Amino acid sequence: MRARGNPVSGGEVVKVVKDHPGGTKNTRPRRTNARLAAVISESGLSREQVARAFVRVAIENGATDLAGIGRSHVTHWVGGSRPSGSAPVILCEALSRCLGRTVTLEEIGLTAAGDAAVPGTGWDTDTLTALADLGRHERDMTVNRREALGTATYQLAALTLPAAAWWTSLAERRLRRATPGSRTFGRGDVEAVREATAMFSRIDQRRGGGHARAAVVQYLTSDVAHYLRGTYRDDGVRRDMFAAASELAYLSGWMSFDNGNHAVAQRHFILAVQLAAEADDAPMAGHVLRAMAHQAIDLGHIHPGLRLAAASVEGKRYSEASPRERALLGVVHGKALAAAGDHKAAAVALIRAEVDLADATPAGSEPARVFFFSEASLAHETACALRYLGDLDGAARSFQRSVRTRRAATFTRTHAVTLGYLGAVQASQGAIEEACVTWNRAMDAMDGIRSARTRNVVADIRAVLATHRRRSVPAAITLETRASDFLRTTA
C-alpha cells in the first residue's frame, strides 16, 4: 500500500505502510527510486519479469527466504521501499544479467551507510590480496554466516575470462614479488601442502563438501597464505608453491560448490585460477576452469559454461595435461556441448575423452588432483551428456556402467549422486518401480554424507514421486516418506 504525496525532485513521495518479504516496514515518506526505475526501463522487462529474474538468482544463492518475491515487491522498491538483507545485492546481479553489464547498488539507488559494495568479478584483484580478502570473508561467515553470505552473489560477469595478456602478466608478477619473510621455504613445504590437499580431497570424495571445509579454508588462508609471501631457495620452488596453493583453493571451492554455496565457490575458483596463472601452470588452470564450467552448467548457465569448458581445453591447458586430466577436461567439454545442443561436436569430444583415458598411466604417475577420475567418472559424465542429447537408453547404460565400475567405499558421494541420476532416467522411461529400487540404493549410500548435491537428488526424487501418488505404487509411497524424512533431518 502507498500513500501518494506531492511530486518532488527525484520522484514522487510515497509511504510504505505494510511489511513484505525483501522490504522493511517504514511509515516515513519516501521518494520514488528513480534510479531503479530507469535501470528497469533500460532492461525492457516488466516488473513481474524482474521479480522472476530476482527469484532465480535468490534460489541459486540459497536465499530461499526471498523466493516469494513478486511484482508487487518490485513496485514497492521502485516506490521507495528499500529491500532488506541480501535482496539489494541479488537485485544487482539479476539486473546485471538482464542487461549484460555490471549494475551497482549506487546505480539503482540502494547504497546506504555501512553497505558493502557489490564485489567485482575478482580477476583484476592482486592474487595475494584476493586471498587475504577471502580469509576475512570466511572469518565474517564464522561470526555471522547469514550476513556474510548476503554480501556475495554468484556472478555471471565473473564467467568472462580475462584476455591473453592477463595470463602473461600474472606469470611475470610472481617473479617481481617482494620476499619480506625471514624464513626460507623449500620443497618439503610444498609437499606438505600437497599432502594436506590430498587428505582433504579424499574426505570430500567420500563424505561430501560439508565435511572439513572449514579446516581446508583455515589452512589455505593462514599457513599457505604465509608461505606464498615467503622467501624461496629458487623460483622453481616458489612456482610449485603457487601451484599447490591453487589446488588447495580449487578444493575449497569444489567443496563449497558441492555444499550448495555457489557464490563462495566462485570466489575460491577465481582465486585458484589466479594462483595457477602466477605459477604458469596451464593444466592446473584448465582443471579449475573445468570445475567452473561444471558449476555453471549445473546452475543452468549453459552457454557461459560452454565457454569455460572450451577455455579449459585450449592450448597448453590441454596439450600439457596428463592423459587422465585431458580425459576429464574433454568429457566435461563434451557434456557442455551436449547441453548446448551441439550433437556432432559433443560426440567427437566424448570419443576423444575415451581415447585419452585409455592412454592414461597408473594413477601414481599423474597429478594427485585427478586421482578420482576413472572409467566410472567418465561413464557418469558421458551419461549426463547423453541425457542432455535425449538419449535416455544410452544415458541409463552409461550410468549403470558408472555404478558398476566405481569404488563406492572411496567415492561414496558421487556414487550416491550417480544412482540418483540413474533412477531419474529410469523413471523418465516409465520404470517407476525399478527407479524406486535404484533410489533406495542411492539413499542407503547417503548415510554420513554432507552434500547439497545429494540433498538435491533427494528433493528431485520427491518431485518425481509426487506425480505417481495417484497410481498408489507401494514402493513409491514408502520411498516418498523416506525422502521426506531425509530432507527434514538433514536440513
Image (cartoon, rainbow, N blue to C red):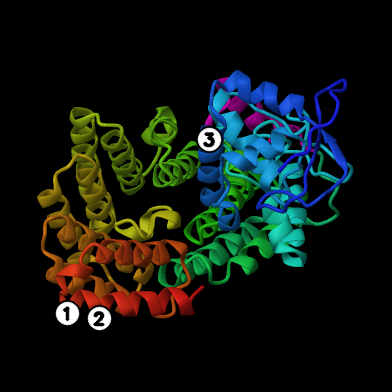
Residue occupying image coordinates x 84% and y 47%: 27
**In this rendering, position of residue 209 left or right of residue 180:** left
Tag 3: amino acid: Glu
Does residue 366 sit above or below 113 in this rendering?
Answer: below
**Mark 1, residue position:** 474
Classify residue 271 by image quadrant. Answer: top right
Percent of width and height locating residue 440: 25, 76
User: What secondary structure is found at the residue carrying circle 1?
Assistant: helix
**What label does residue 386 carry, if any?**
none
Magenta stretch in the rendered image? 159-177
> Which one is in front in this view, the residue at disc 3 or the one at disc 1?
3
Residue located beneath label 2 in the image:
478
In the displayed structure image, the side of residue 11 where residue 355 appears, left or right: left
User: Who's the residue at 79% across and 33% down the image?
Assistant: 4
Residue found 18% across the figure and 28% down from its top: 344
Q: Where residue 476 sits: x, y (%)?
A: 21, 74
Task: Please state which amino acid type lies under the numbered disc 1.
Answer: Pro
**Three-letter amino acid code at disc 2?**
Thr
Dot 3 alpha-carbon crowd within 10 angstroms: few under 14, some 14 to 19, many 20 or more: some
Choose mark 3 or mark 2, whichever is in front.
3
Label 3 sits on residue: 48
Pointer 3 or 1: first along the chain: 3
Give yes or no for residue 161 being in the magenta stretch: yes
The answer to whether residue 25 shows anywhere in this view is yes
Q: Position of residue 471 (x, y in %)?
A: 15, 69
Cα distance in 3D space between marks 3 and 2:
39 Å
The answer to whether the residue labelled 2 contacts the one labelled 1, judged by CB atoms less than 8 Å apart, is yes
Q: Is residue 452 above or below residue 482?
A: above
In this rendered view, identify the residue nearer to me: 288 or 427: 427
The answer to whether the residues at label 3 and label 1 have Cβ atoms under 8 Å apart is no
Q: Residues within 10 Å of mark 2 (few under 14, many from 20)?
A: few
Q: Secondary structure at mark 2?
A: helix
